[in-house]
Image (cartoon, rainbow, N blue to C red):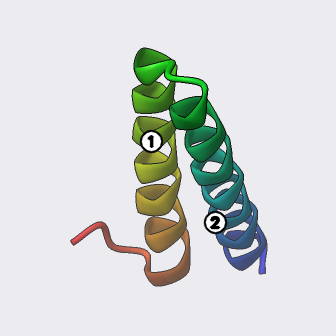
Amino acid sequence: MERSIFGFFTAFLSVICVICAIQTFRKKRFGLAALFLLNAFTNLVNSIHAFYMTLF
């Protein structure tokens, strides 16, 4: 149960990071947008790991 809650939480954080990256792209802050996209990818990998107990 804790793993699915953690997976849902990290997937939610991934969506928030993508939204923040879109806003920073509009303001032409490309370095910050790249960091947000990297964080979103990391959160997505963590949520997959939490749901399926395997990375790849």
In the image, what residue type sits under mark 2? Ala
- The image shows residue 44, relative to residue 8, as above or below, that is above
Residue 52 is situated, as x and y percent measured from the top left of the image, at 44, 82
- Is 7 in front, or is 28? 28
Residue 33 located left or right of residue 4: left
Q: Specify whether 19 is left or right of 49.
A: right
Find numbered disc 1 in the image and state the secondary structure of the residue it sits on. Answer: helix
Query: Tag count in the figure?
Result: 2
Secondary element at image label 2 = helix
Are there few (<14), some (14-19), or many (20+) residues within 10 Å of tag 2?
Answer: many
Residue drawn at x 45%, y 72% as measured from the top left:
48
Image x and y of residue 35, in percent: 45, 26
In terms of image quadrants, where is residue 45?
Answer: bottom left
Vertical placement of 23 versus 1: above or below?
A: above
Quadrant holding the N terminus = bottom right
| Side of 4 where 31 appears, left or right | left
Measure the C-alpha gap from mark 2 to mark 1.
Answer: 13 Å
Labels 2 and 1: the sequence-earlier one? 2
Q: Residue at x 65, y 60 (%)?
A: 15
In the picture of the structure, the residue carrying the numbered disc 1 is 37
Question: Picture coordinates of residue 41 (x, y %)?
Answer: 41, 51
Q: Nearer the viewer, residue 36 or 46?
A: 36
Q: Is 6 on the left-hand or right-hand side of 45? A: right
Near mark 1 (Cα within 10 A), the count class, few <14, some 14-19 or many ≥20, is many
* Quadrant position of the C terminus in the picture: bottom left
Q: Residue at x 64, y 69 (%)?
A: 7
Q: Nearer the viewer, mark 2 or mark 1?
A: 1
Q: Name the residue that disc number 2 marks.
A: 11
